[in-house]
Image (cartoon, rainbow, N blue to C red):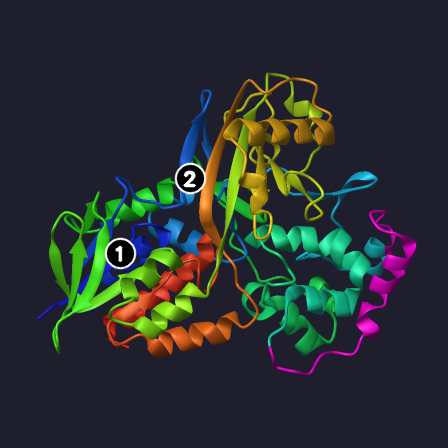
Amino acid sequence: MSRRVVVVGAGITGLTVAYRMLRSPYTVEVLVVETDREPGGVIRSVRVGDLDLEAGPDALLVRKPWALDLCYELGLEGELVPQGATASQVLTPRGLLPVPSGRLGIPASATGLVRWKGMPVAARLRAMAEPLVPRRHSERDTSVAALLRRRLGRGATEALVAPLLAGIYAGDIDRLSVEAAFPELALWERELGSLRAGARAKAVPVRRVPAGPTTPFATIRGGLHRLPAALAEALEPGTLRFGATVVKLGREERGPYRVATDDGDDLPADAVVLATPASVSAELLAEVAPRAAQLIRQISAASTAIALFVYPKGTNRRLPEAAGFVTRRGALPITAATAISKKWPRQAFGSRAVVRAYVGGDGLEHELDRSDDEILSSARDTLAGVYRLTAEPEHAALVRWPGSMPQYAVGHLERLGAIEAALPPGLYVAGGAYRGAGIPDRVREAGAVADRVVRQD
């Protein structure tokens, strides 16, 4: 007899869970229930003028191979597009400065560090002494900020590394767990005794993107939404159900779970995978796994917004040859910007500058307490000042993402262990709130969850 599995959520996580289960050697009946009318979750595009621009994630991190492997598996390998401009910049009192060569914002050489003019000489000298700082022997989790300040000093942390790392999670590095958010940093200190040594170490080999040389990031021609669309198409007919919201999760005594939807259906399931935001999962688990629900509620999520701008023809040459810039926390109304027309020059932008700016984040949600027009106006003015753009954008759009960026607070991995222990057999949670926010991490986690479900682990 086949095992009945209901997956709640048709974002990249839920779709990959379903895809992996149906391709396992085990016999399973899978139904994916999704509130929206299309798959993808946060992976979607928005029309800005005559362009379709990414409104959520805009790239696949190449050194984490799981998403690229999935693209190859789904026949999208010929559609992968390598990054154009790869340099990143930091906005400093001296203007935009390139990030020194290294990894995770950590300069790989003392020369690169001493030559970086974005902080005082004293801060550079302190950071140069990082290899001499005794390694921390405690196994207890700590914040990203605590590790960085202890090893690099406050100056280098605040001026160089924090803007880069905080932006990945739209977070506050004083609250982010180093073990959950950036385990490489803890590993470099523990195993190599130095962050600089880790930044110098050879990176994990990456798969070459067919359309060009290896670059840190890649995208899919036509937009990343083609990945969840390909997953949905690869599922068996009848597997996907759109336009239905799961409103309650219950269980009969010694019987199957009951998954109730807002249109009156009561679906029996031997296993349920909640591939939904943490807040939604906590609500659905309240009756059948109250302790797990309580723990999941402790995972907060920051709200953000993305401002998209399309400038007139001839403006792209005004932008520096860099993928974008980051800035010190709270220094500007925006936290970072991506020069889309430089990062992805193979797209149909012509000579137009296309830029997206990031607003909000953990502790910066007050920036979102304004109208769309006000946010767009301040972001536009900020970009004009930083990039010295004199032309006005021809088109602009704002996409809000309330509660979209899970925050991996100190102790996050310990909390995950407690959540998994509190879930009764047959119940699983997956998604960005748990083991990685990027698309590759979600694909990897989804595969692991699918394996546990079919093995009844």
Q: Nearer the viewer, residue 31 or 66?
A: 31
SS at circle 2? helix
Mark 1 lies on residue: 8
Image quadrant in which you'd find residue 166: bottom right
Q: Nearer the viewer, residue 339 or 156?
A: 156
Say which amino acid is labelled 2.
Glu
| Quadrant into which the C terminus falls | bottom left
Number of numbered discs present? Answer: 2
- Marks 1/2: CA–CA distance: 29 Å
Residue 406 rendering spot, x and y as whole percentages: 48, 57
Residue 127 as seen in the image, left or right of residue 250: right
Give me the disc on residue 31.
Answer: none
Residue 33 rendering spot, x and y as whole percentages: 22, 52
Give me the disc on residue 79.
Answer: 2
Say which amino acid is labelled 1.
Val
Residue at the farthest right position: 121
| Quadrant into which the N terminus falls | bottom left
In the image, is residue 287 above or below residue 421?
Answer: above
Q: Residues within 10 Å of mark 1 (few under 14, many from 20)?
A: many
Measuring 81% from the left and 57% from the top, which residue is drawn there? 155
In this view of the protein, can residue 14 be seen by the observer? yes
Which span is picked out in magenta? 114-140
SS at circle 1? strand
Q: Residues within 10 Å of mark 2 (few under 14, many from 20)?
A: some
Residue 283 in magenta stretch: no
Measuring 31% from the left and 74% from the top, which residue is drawn there? 423
